[in-house]
Image (cartoon, helix red, strand yellow):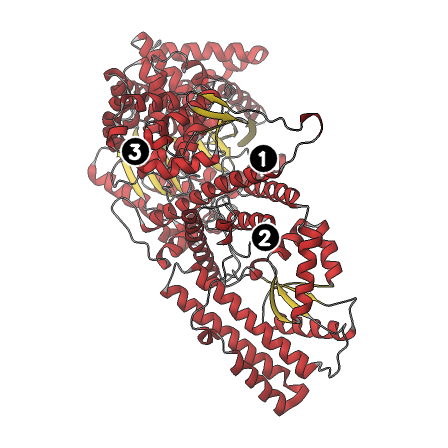
Amino acid sequence: MTQTRVPRQRAIIDRRALDAAIAGHVEGKGAKARPEILETLRDALAAGRAELSQRLLDKPSAGHEITAGHAFLVDQLVRVIHDHVTSHVYPAANRSSSERIAILAVGGYGRAEMAPKSDVDIAFLHPSRRTAWCEQVTEAMLYFLWDLGLKVGQSSRTPSDMVKMAQEDLTIRTALLEGRFVWGDRPLYDEARARFWAEVVTGTERQFVSEKLAERDERHERTGGSRYVVEPNVKEGKGGLRDLQTLYWIGKYIHPARNAAELVDAGLLTQPEYHSFRRAERFLLAVRCHLHELTGRAEDRLTFDFQKQVAERMRFADRRGKSAVERFMQFYFLQAKRVGSLTGVFLSQLDQQFAKKRARTGLLAGFSAKPRQFKGYTVFGGKIAAPSETWFKKDPVRLIEIFQLAEAEGLEIDPRTMRQADRDSSLIHDDVREDPRANALFLDLLCGKNDPENGLRWMNEAGVFGKFVPDFGRVNAQMQFNMYHHYTVDEHTIRAIGFLSKIEKGELADDHPRATRQIHKVKSRRVAYVAALLHDIAKGRGGDHSILGADVAEDLCPRFGLDEDETEIVAWLVRQHLLMSATAFKRDLTDPKTIEDFVGEVQSLERLRQLAILTAVDIRAVGPGTWNSWKGQLLGELYDASHERLRLGHMRHHREHRVAARKQAVREDMGAKATIMDAFGDLFGDAYWVAEPEDVIARNLVQYSVAREIDEDLSIHCEFDEDRGATLVTVIAADHPGLFYRIAGGIHLAGGNIIDARIHTTRNGWAVDNFLVQDPVGRSFAEPDQLARIKKSIADAIANRGELVPRLAQRPLPRARAKAFDVRPRVLFDNDASGRFTVIEVNARDRSALLNRLGRALFESQLIVHSAHITAYGERAADIFYVTDLTGSKVVDDARKEAIRAALLEAASDERQAELEPA
């Protein structure tokens, strides 16, 4: 945007030397010299790119210099090619006035911002409808550019064509807006440029602004809707290069500015804001250049597999608690945040300039709405603004007050006041942080009943949030380098508060019925909101963020105005905010010991309510699709069982009573088919009746009776269960060793992902195994062809038709970029979590064959799997097995446990996967 001078130009390309070399080829071979000329041009392009690649390594943040260097390299090649074609290929001694060509660089090439693999966008201008000479020259130049391997976007038009098409097409108008003369007939270019501004731009300024902003909003929605998505698009994403370019296009169209620096003279940016504009642009351009270099293509998505490499190339280093890639991405998001702030103030200034130009006519001429005063602030057009430039300096507590008033009154913050708050946020020192009024205002904002999410987001964008709560400032723009979290820590936290507000207003009752009821029963709603704010506050500090966060809570809660009891429960919630999800997703909820241990930690109904609410909003705020009905059901089961235990002081029924009650409920549910209970009910042991829900038992009994009636050795039933958000796969077969891992392998081969498994054996030796299955990213697995594929695949696996292990190894990772992460396998044994079973937890990189391989390792270790619970956290899987040895006892011998650990680690290792994959 601001033309950057390229240093040491001849080290990139020497046009005079290139001209001389081409002339030498022509002198020696004449018209037959094209291959030699093309080879010379190729060498020049390769040498220029190599020079710029080295410069990028030497100065890894020099985005402007490198992109300008690539544009300069193409400029010189285009000039050399033009001169060669017009002098040697199609020379014309006495050209007519129609035989003229002007070459324009447009788009990113026109801005002189070209990454290594950017397209070359060129416009060929000629005075009138194409003459033979103009067509020949244009075609010859294009063939040279194509043969050089450049991806060329080209047009060939007269000035009249150009004007007509620009009037009709926003994309063409935008490309021509930054058209730059490269070579050829300068008067022709000047004529076209004058006509463009006179006939296209004049009078269409408002329309252009409106269309560009609509285009921007659509682009943001397409690329994730937030500037804090953890795999951002550097070019098209929110807070990316295209947002900066949009500001420049709008400013240039309105004023007409020749470069971004002139936006300051136009009053759209201040000098410090312009410098911030250039810093963000320089960094983003450099990141884009590194991406192109690494991928060898025009890649603009900063995906996990390239983030580490770009961070290394840009010389970010590890620090205590934060890896180099996390520090790099935090800096990236700070730049994206800055782009958002610049956009707000820029558009506000633009709106004000338009308003001054707007003339009223008719009956309302001379009338203008008056702004009103509200608690000293100016309110106009739904926006609240500071009344003077010194407003915050006179009382810095007002930096908190304005956001609280905006939330309470349903107002937006005027962007110019956002600029002022950003500037004056440095006024917030300890005296403001400790001020009781300031903290009361902040707590009112945090717990606001209108829209606290937006109020806090504005506060964060203005830099006030991080200054007032420095612990929050430490996680500002902090990325978590994994595939589970979709947003930065600050964005995740603010979204969690937004979901909490929606739950309290009843807007998410379908997904969160318990939380919607319980939020109105808690003793302190302030506890819920402060816990949501602080639950991840200590991430990136090099320790357990839950424990460290509890310490932060104990310091901050009294400052915010919470009493001793509220402080105690907030600190507990932060310390234990992962307890409920870990118990629900990793433990057998039908095992009484699971409930006893959970209740022993929770200890009160108030804690249970608060923890359930916090767990729901925490999971929901991780990202789209993270919350699903299966997680909701598991958390609901844990909540209901724990609520009963806490309310009564004991479990309502002992084991025998629970079994009897379950049998009676199933009998009633089965209605006319209840006779099946009499025939087969006693074949299932008490553990089965305790473990399985009533609806699943009813289905199992019907399937078992049909299988026995037709003398079926293998019965497989697949049925999508909408309430659980998963497919129930039931396999009934003669029990034999290794059945579990073979069934798991068959399901995986069919493209299914097992999220829960319960393994039972009837008293007469039949296995009745229930699996809950989704697709690899947690969506429903319900299409008829999918279910048929599961059945066939399981049958083939059990019958040992085909080599199971090699076929599993060939399946792609559930998440294609999982290899970008280092996931060290871990195996944990717990003999205290269950009264009957040893609980083994395996953490490893998620992959299609993992459960099958782990199941086989357990089988070969002579263990019986009674249930399995599988949870995926992005690239990481946590597989939990409830096992006994062949005698039905727990595994207690240390040497035996070490042998099992070694077998499971080998099965889970990446090296083992690599051995199985075909060469």
For the residues marked 1 and 3, what is the alpha-carbon distance in whole angstroms? 61 Å
- Residue plotted at (39% across, 23% down): 445
Q: Mark 2: which amino acid?
A: Pro
Q: Give residue 526's quadrant in the image.
A: top left
- Residue plotted at (29% across, 9% down): 649
Locate residue 893, reporting x and y percent: 21, 35
Residue 523 as seen in the image, left or right of residue 238: left
Q: Which residue is tagged 1?
A: 787
Q: Which residue is tagged 2?
A: 256
Q: Mark 1: which amino acid?
A: Leu
Question: Pointer 2: residues within 10 angstroms few (<14), some, or many (20+)?
Answer: some
Q: Earlier in the sequence, mark 1 or mark 3?
A: 3
Foreground mark, 2 or 1, reads 2
| Between 454 and 833, the one nearer to me in the picture | 454
Q: Secondary structure at mark 1?
A: helix
Look at the numbered discs 1 and 3 and tell me whether their residues touch, using CB distance below 8 Å: no
